[in-house]
Image (cartoon, rainbow, N blue to C red):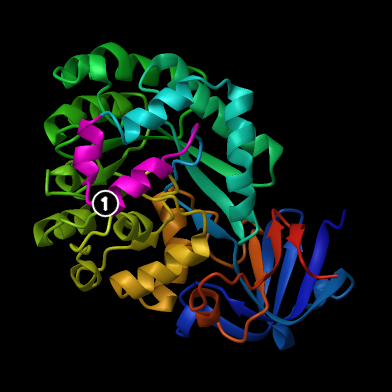
């Protein structure tokens, strides 16, 4: 295993602020010591101290930070292909949920599975994302809504991080929906099931963040505040599904608790955006759900830009509202559907996605960052985002080592 290496003959999209689009550096070099980038820049400026290190020629390819999918529900049982047919027949997301479909259907299938079975069913989806350059993925619970299954989902997520060369960040989403037995008593569900399950998961070291679904079919902002208050007391950051189907005050709650991110945001208004900026909360856009649900209300992208809110992009991979297993297509959708620029989309799956997960050592190519890199057979960064159904990844470097490659 090579621990000290110089990658040369490459072009860099560092995604750092250097006055150039994408943070571009031509005729670039990256110096890696073990798992860390120790130097990067123009070849002509390479310090002599690295002259005897092992060198590898990348044949003029483009190198970006390794990609990050900062919002997924990728661990689950079963599928909801039948609901896809119902939606195409005119049924709404709310109508399907009211009839016992939606999250409830996946809940029933997921509860049947052991941790090894959950891992087994999820790995093919994980592998598909790794093949597109993903080095970090966020995985939520939320398809159990009982203590045992919520814990099992988080255990499965941790196991995936051990079985694959990928960093897994977990989010406890026990407040995804009130189960049928608590449908008319969501506060009781939070107090009797959700919060105790969170406490057990935290004791087991299974939780990196706490999430909640703030919507009229799930929980109100007032109800979720009791969960966020407990998360805060446990020292856990929060994030939220907010303003997807209506404006329910989730963004304001996220800002109050300085959330890592507020996700979806189709119905967010300018006051919400101002609150996000003031709390330094990332806006995570999820175009797969927008596309799959055939929504018409778009997130307020220009208002987010105007106020300088950090924008991330993710797959929202889940069996119902966003069965999207491609970060590349998510970036393309973000451009086509939400009118992001390709540079914004790439930032949204690198530096901005890292911020959405609270990861200060990832998402950019610069000294001190973890050496997670994606190497592309493209002439320009926009070519990563532009095609649909085509993957130009040449190789993926995870913590300094090639772990997925088509280069021979």
For this view, does 74 lie left or right of residue 282? Answer: right
In the current view of this chain or complex, which residue is farthest to the top? Answer: 192
Residue at x-position 87% and y-position 68%: 53
Front in this rendered view, residue 140 or 282:
140
For this view, does 54 lie left or right of residue 84? Answer: right
Please check the rendered image and state whether residue 266 is part of the magenta-colored stretch, yes or no. Answer: no
For this view, does 306 lie left or right of residue 237? Answer: left
Residue at x-position 70% and y-position 72%: 30
Residue at x-position 76% and y-position 54%: 34
> In the displayed structure, would residue 47 be above or below residue 156?
below
Tell me residue 211's x, y (percent).
Answer: 33, 36
The residue to which callout 1 is attached is 89
Mark 1 secondary-structure assignment: loop
Q: Is residue 143 visible?
A: no
The residues colored magenta run 77-99
Which quadrant of the figure has residue 372? bottom right
In the current view of this chain or complex, which residue is farthest to the front? Answer: 89
């Amino acid at each position: 295993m090579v621990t000290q290496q110089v990658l040369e003959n490459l072009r860099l999209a560092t995604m750092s602020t250097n006055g150039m689009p994408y943070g571009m550096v031509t005729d670039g070099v990256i110096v890696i010591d073990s798992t860390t980038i120790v130097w990067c820049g123009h070849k002509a400026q390479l310090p002599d101290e690295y002259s005897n290190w092992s060198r590898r020629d990348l044949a003029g390819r483009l190198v970006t930070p390794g990609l990050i999918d900062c919002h997924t529900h990728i661990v689950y049982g079963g599928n909801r292909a039948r609901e896809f047919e119902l939606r195409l027949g005119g049924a709404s997301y709310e109508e399907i949920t009211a009839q016992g479909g939606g999250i409830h259907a996946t809940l029933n299938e997921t509860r049947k599975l052991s941790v090894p079975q959950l891992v087994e069913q999820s790995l093919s989806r994980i592998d598909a994302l790794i093949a597109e350059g993903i080095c970090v993925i966020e995985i939520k619970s939320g398809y159990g809504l009982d203590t045992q299954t919520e814990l099992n989902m988080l255990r499965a997520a941790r196991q995936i991080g051990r079985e694959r060369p990928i960093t897994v960040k977990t989010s406890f989403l026990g407040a995804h929906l009130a189960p049928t037995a608590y449908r008319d008593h969501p506060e009781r569900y939070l107090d009797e099931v959700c919060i105790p399950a969170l406490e057990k998961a935290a004791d087991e070291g299974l939780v990196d963040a706490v999430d909640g679904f703030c919507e009229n079919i799930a929980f109100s902002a007032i109800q979720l505040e009791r969960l966020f208050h407990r998360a805060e007391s446990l020292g856990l950051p929060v994030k939220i599904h907010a303003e997807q189907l209506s404006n329910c005050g989730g963004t304001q709650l996220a800002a109050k608790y300085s959330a890592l991110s507020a996700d979806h945001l189709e119905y967010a208004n300018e006051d919400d955006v101002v609150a996000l900026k003031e709390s330094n909360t990332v806006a995570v856009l999820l175009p797969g759900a927008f596309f799959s649900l055939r929504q018409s209300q778009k997130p307020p992208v220009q208002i987010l830009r105007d106020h300088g809110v950090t924008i991330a992009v993710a797959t929202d991979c889940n069996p119902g509202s966003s069965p999207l297993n491609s970060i590349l297509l998510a970036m393309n959708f973000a451009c086509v559907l939400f009118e992001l620029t390709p540079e914004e989309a790439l930032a949204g799956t690198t530096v901005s996605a890292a911020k959405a997960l609270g990861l200060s050592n990832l998402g950019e190519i610069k000294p001190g960052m973890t050496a997670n890199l994606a190497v592309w057979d493209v002439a320009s960064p926009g070519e990563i985002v532009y095609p649909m159904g085509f993957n130009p990844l040449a190789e993926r470097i995870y913590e300094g080592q090639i772990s997925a490659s088509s280069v021979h």
